[in-house]
Image (tube, helix red, strand yellow):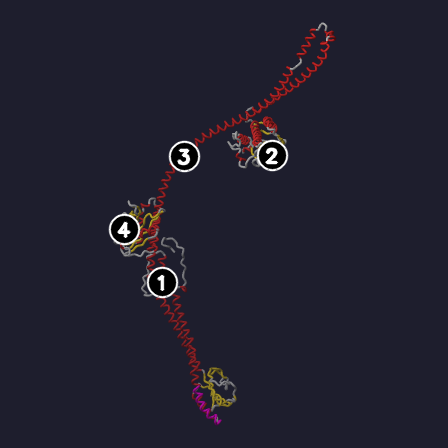
């Protein structure tokens, strides 16, 4: 089926069968009623007519038996049955319908009179039943050899049960009459059925014709012709139905026009960039479709006193209708129940008003008004305005569909106004955003430039800190060297002092005196030695003096050997310092155990002063390719921190344990464990942050620079501690080969 818009509707028209049409059903119903009536008549009348025929036979048989009873009464006294026989023969001759007459005594003796003759015979109980009731029935009687109407009545005489009187009547007339009754009834039924069928069809056609006409009009309306109407004058309910349908079609047509205007309004308001440019077309379309006198749009505002007022912005007028713009100019919603109108509209409800109930309000708006509809236009911030429709010709009852359509158009206006506001706000926001983006871009550029300058300064400061750290490390090494050299020089000074004292205290002056005495007595030396008391003591004295001089010589030789060893120690210390004073950053293959020993030797004096026990737990490890100076600085820092941690803990038995291990085939670890103050859990990672320190005189750069140096060499440095007072372990892990170093740095080996 094609709808009003030209599109195929969802319904499909099925071809109707004749038996399902209303005309066929009406005529069939009427005919069936007639047939049922005829059947009922035949069913009731046939048995009754047959009963009447049987009653006629019974009445005839009863009359015959009555006449026979009088004759039989005389015979019962005289036992002479000739009179009975003669009477019976006369009766048979007088009526051909009588088949037999039988007079039976109670003992069975019977007088049988038939057309063929008469005879006496003893008959059975069939002719003298035990119950003495009158019998009248059509039955087969063997005596007659065919069906007859058998009539039997008991015969009593003087209070005695004398016998029975039996009359047999032919059923030929009865059967003929019954056949005629059946024929007449059948003919009547056929004529009645035919006539009723004709009358039913004619009457059904007359009754159904308006319905068919109405059906055709309904089909036209359903097909899209909303102007089709049913003009019926049947004077019955069908005419009322047609008028109701026409009214419904008018309502649908009006609603369709209004809905089309709503669709037009929605299309226009959704596609227009400026709603004010198309509002006149929308008002004209909606006003014409609704058949109103005026359609207008009001906007709310506040006057100088802050009172709510409305002003007409746009209006459409039907021909011959005057404008109400002056009435709606700065219109105040006060008085004449207008406050109730304003409250109703503020709540978002459609307002309907009519004459004369709202006559006072109409006087303020337009005295010619008869009814109006006001649909509020609402925005997010409240009641913006309204859409009004006036009827000036007659009082009009506004349907719910019309009110809903007007409210829908008002909502569309609200949406269009809100959309245009939002669009304008979006444009302004976009412009503001562009300005802010430009300003922010300039700020970011300045911040980026300042950040780059700060990063450059930071990099420079960090490089200076690295250099200072390296210089501090070198200074620490030099300090350790000077301290060790000073200790050795103390030993050298002691040895030199001992030698000087020995030289000053030497008895060589006595030897000179002995030499002078011998030189003085050179001429008589033997005599002097033998006879002179001084000479005699001179030889033993020289022997003792030689022994003393030999002892002094051994002491001075021993001190000189010590002095030579001390000087050699100083040379070794200076050589070690010179080996680490070379340019750093060069990768060299070194023995990590030797580096550890060098670091221990440098801080040996500090460990000895605190009587620190040093445990070495070294496993054989392969040489490593590292920056020797950087590794030395890390080890010196770890040993110094361990020594300081034990001093801070005031450990009475300070102990440092150095472990050297391999991890797999690619890594080697050096760990330094102390029994000092330990580390809280929160400081395990923070201790490697730049500037973080737990010592009053610390600068917070030693471990930070050590961790960075380890990372640059492809290794890592981390700390472990059971908590405060439980000591700490610092582990340095270094790569053994280039593959492990590349893995640690996140780079492929070259």
* Residue 537 shown left or right of residue 584 in the figure: right
CA–CA distance between discs 2 and 1?
104 Å
CA–CA distance between discs 2 and 3?
52 Å
- The residue labelled by disc 4 is 317
CA–CA distance between discs 1 and 3?
81 Å
Measured from the top left, where is residue 415 in percent x and y?
A: 36, 47
- The residue labelled by disc 2 is 663
On whether residue 148 falls in the magenta region, the answer is no
Q: For numbered disc 2, what is the local secondary structure?
A: strand
Mark 1: few/some/many CA within 10 Å (<14, 14-19, 20+): some
**Which residue is more in the foreground, 497 or 269?**
497
Residue 734 shows in this picture: no
Q: For numbered disc 3, what is the local secondary structure?
A: helix
- The residue labelled by disc 1 is 212
The N terminus - image quarter: bottom left
Residue found 41% across the figure and 72% down from its top: 36
408 versus 516 height, above or below: below
Measured from the top left, where is residue 321 in percent x and y?
A: 26, 52
CA–CA distance between discs 4 and 2?
98 Å
Q: For numbered disc 4, what is the local secondary structure?
A: strand
**Which residue is more in the foreground, 149 or 354?**
354
- Which SS does the magenta portion mostly show? helix
């Amino acid at each position: 089926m094609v709808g009003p818009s030209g599109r195929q509707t969802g319904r499909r028209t099925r071809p109707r069968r004749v038996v399902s049409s209303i005309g066929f059903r009406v005529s069939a119903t009427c005919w069936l009623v007639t047939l049922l009536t005829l059947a009922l008549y035949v069913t009731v009348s046939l048995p009754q007519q047959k009963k009447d025929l049987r009653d006629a036979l019974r009445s005839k048989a009863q009359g015959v038996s009555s006449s026979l009873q009088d004759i039989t009464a005389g015979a019962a006294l005289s036992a002479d049955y000739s009179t009975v026989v003669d009477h019976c023969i006369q009766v048979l001759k007088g009526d051909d319908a009588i088949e037999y007459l039988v007079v039976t005594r109670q003992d069975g003796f019977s007088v049988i009179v038939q057309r063929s003759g008469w005879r006496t015979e003893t008959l059975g109980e069939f002719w003298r039943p035990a119950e003495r009731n009158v019998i009248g029935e059509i039955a087969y009687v063997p005596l007659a050899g065919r069906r007859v109407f058998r009539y039997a009545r008991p015969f009593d005489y003087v209070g005695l049960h004398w016998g029975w009187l039996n009359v047999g009547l032919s059923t030929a007339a009865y059967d003929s009459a019954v056949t005629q009754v059946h024929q007449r009834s059948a003919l009547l039924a056929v004529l009645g059925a035919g006539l009723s069928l004709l009358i039913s069809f004619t009457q059904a056609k007359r009754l159904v014709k308006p319905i068919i006409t109405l059906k055709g009009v309904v089909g036209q309306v359903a097909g899209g012709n909303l102007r089709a109407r049913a003009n019926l004058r049947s004077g019955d309910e069908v005419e009322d139905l047609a008028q109701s349908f026409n009214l419904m079609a008018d309502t649908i047509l009006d609603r369709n026009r209004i809905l089309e205007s709503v669709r037009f309004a929605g299309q226009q308001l959704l596609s227009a960039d400026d709603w004010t440019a198309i509002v006149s077309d929308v008002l004209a379309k909606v006003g014409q479709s609704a058949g109103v006198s005026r359609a207008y749009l009001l906007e709310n505002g506040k006057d100088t006193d802050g009172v709510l007022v409305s002003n007409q912005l746009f209006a459409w007028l039907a021909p011959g209708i005057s404008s109400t713009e002056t009435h709606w100019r700065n219109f105040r919603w006060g008085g004449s129940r207008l406050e109730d109108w304003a409250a109703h509209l503020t709540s978002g409800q459609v307002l309907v008003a009519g004459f004369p109930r709202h006559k006072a309000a109409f006087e303020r708006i337009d005295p010619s008004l008869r009814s109006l509809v006001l649909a509020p236009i609402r925005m997010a911030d409240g009641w913006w305005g309204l859409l009004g429709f006036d009827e000036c010709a007659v009082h009009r009852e506004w349907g719910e569909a019309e009110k809903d359509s007007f409210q829908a158009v008002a909502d569309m206006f609200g949406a269009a106004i809100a959309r245009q506001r939002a669009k304008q706000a979006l444009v302004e926001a976009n412009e503001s955003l562009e300005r802010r983006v430009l300003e922010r871009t300039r700020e970011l550029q300045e911040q980026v430039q300042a950040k780059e300058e700060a990063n450059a300064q930071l990099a420079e400061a960090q490089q200076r800190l690295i250099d200072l750290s390296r210089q501090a490390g070198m200074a620490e090494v030099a300090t350790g060297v000077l301290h060790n050299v000073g200790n050795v020089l103390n030993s050298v000074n002691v040895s030199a002092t001992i030698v000087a004292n020995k030289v000053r205290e030497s008895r060589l002056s006595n030897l000179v005196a002995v030499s002078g005495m011998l030189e003085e007595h050179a001429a008589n030396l033997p005599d002097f030695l033998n006879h002179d008391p001084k000479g005699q003591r001179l030889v033993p004295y020289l022997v003792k003096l030689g022994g003393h001089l030999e002892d002094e010589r051994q002491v001075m030789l021993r001190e000189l050997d010590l002095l030579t060893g001390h000087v050699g120690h100083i040379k070794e210390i200076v050589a070690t310092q010179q080996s680490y004073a070379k340019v750093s950053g060069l990768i060299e293959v070194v023995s990590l155990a030797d580096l550890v020993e060098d670091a221990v030797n440098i801080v040996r004096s500090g460990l000895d002063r605190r009587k620190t026990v040093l445990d070495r737990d070294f496993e054989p490890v392969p040489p490593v390719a590292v920056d020797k100076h950087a590794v030395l600085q890390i080890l010196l820092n770890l040993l110094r921190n361990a020594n300081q941690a034990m001093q801070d803990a005031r450990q009475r038995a300070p102990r440092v344990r150095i472990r050297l291990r391999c991890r797999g085939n690619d890594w080697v670890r050096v760990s330094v464990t102390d029994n000092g103050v330990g580390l809280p859990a929160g400081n395990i990672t923070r201790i490697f942050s730049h500037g973080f320190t737990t010592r009053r005189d610390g600068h917070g750069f030693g471990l930070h620079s050590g961790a960075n140096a380890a990372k640059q060499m492809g290794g890592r440095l981390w700390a472990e501690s059971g908590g405060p007072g439980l000591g700490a372990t610092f582990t340095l892990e270094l790569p053994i080969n280039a593959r492990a170093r590349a893995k640690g740095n996140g780079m492929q080996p070259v």
